Amino acid sequence: MKSLKTLFTLFAAAIFTVSCSSDDDNNDNGIKYAEENPLDAYMAGTGFSQKAVDVKNSGIYEYGFSFKPKVTGKINSLIVKIPDTNPTLRITLWDAATKTVIKSETINVATANVTVEKAISPIALTKDKEYFFTVNSDDWINRTKTDGSAATYPITAGNIVITGYAYISSTAAETLFPTNARNTYYAGDITFKFQQTE
């Protein structure tokens, strides 16, 4: 009977240890933060959700938005919706201060005007550091306010603060940092899923 009690105690301790270890591996400090997609809040905050026009085969541009995370976190996936197909659509994350590429990924957009999400190896983002998130394409959804007026940046979208939108004329082979800022429209749709890590 005594050996049965000892065996039961050891078994319970082993289960507790495995359970605690598993919790620590799955999340930081015991907290599992939800993923966030800043696009809807960005469009609502700018008013660019009011009008959308498809633009196809209109010259190749590198375009997108700059942002700062309010917390340390990571990008887990990329999301795109454009009005044409593109098997090699390139999306790039930049260091905004140095204008250097942190990471580029290719997405296969097999169907026009259908949202495509691609899970990626997580990209760590530093709190309050400015990044630029762009796509290289000759197709986009042009989003504006109905009256054509300008938006005022920054726009807070959960834990992401959108600091501006810009573009630059490019080619499919080039990856150029956008320098032409605009505040009367947003060309998209490109976004990501962000997850706080601490």
Image (cartoon, grey):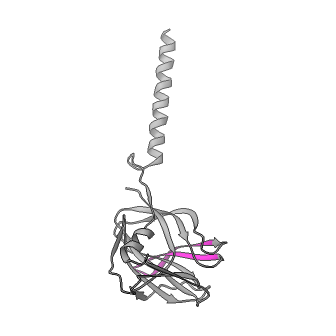
Q: Does 129 sit above or below residue 187?
A: above
Q: Residue at coordinates 47% horizontally, 86% vertically from top-left?
A: 167
Residue 77 locus on image (x, y percent): 53, 64
Magenta region includes residue 98: yes
Total of numbered circles in the picture? 0
Q: Residue at coordinates 44% horizontally, 38% vertically from top-left?
A: 20
Q: Quadrant of the C terminus?
A: bottom left
Q: Is residue 25 left or right of residue 114?
A: left
The residue closer to the viewer here, 172 or 55, is 55
Q: Is residue 124 left or right of residue 198?
A: right
Magenta region includes residue 40: no
Q: Residue at coordinates 65% horizontally, 77% vertically from top-left?
A: 85
Residue 148 locus on image (x, y percent): 40, 87
Question: Which stretch is magenta?
Answer: 88-107
The residue closer to the viewer here, 105 or 117, is 117
Name of the residue lying farthest toward the top: 1
- Dividing the picture into quadrants, the one containing residue 149 is bottom left
Which SS does the magenta portion mostly show?
strand
- Dividing the picture into quadrants, the one containing residue 196 is bottom left
Q: Is residue 62 left or right of residue 87?
A: left
Residue 22 locus on image (x, y percent): 48, 41
Residue 191 locus on image (x, y percent): 49, 70
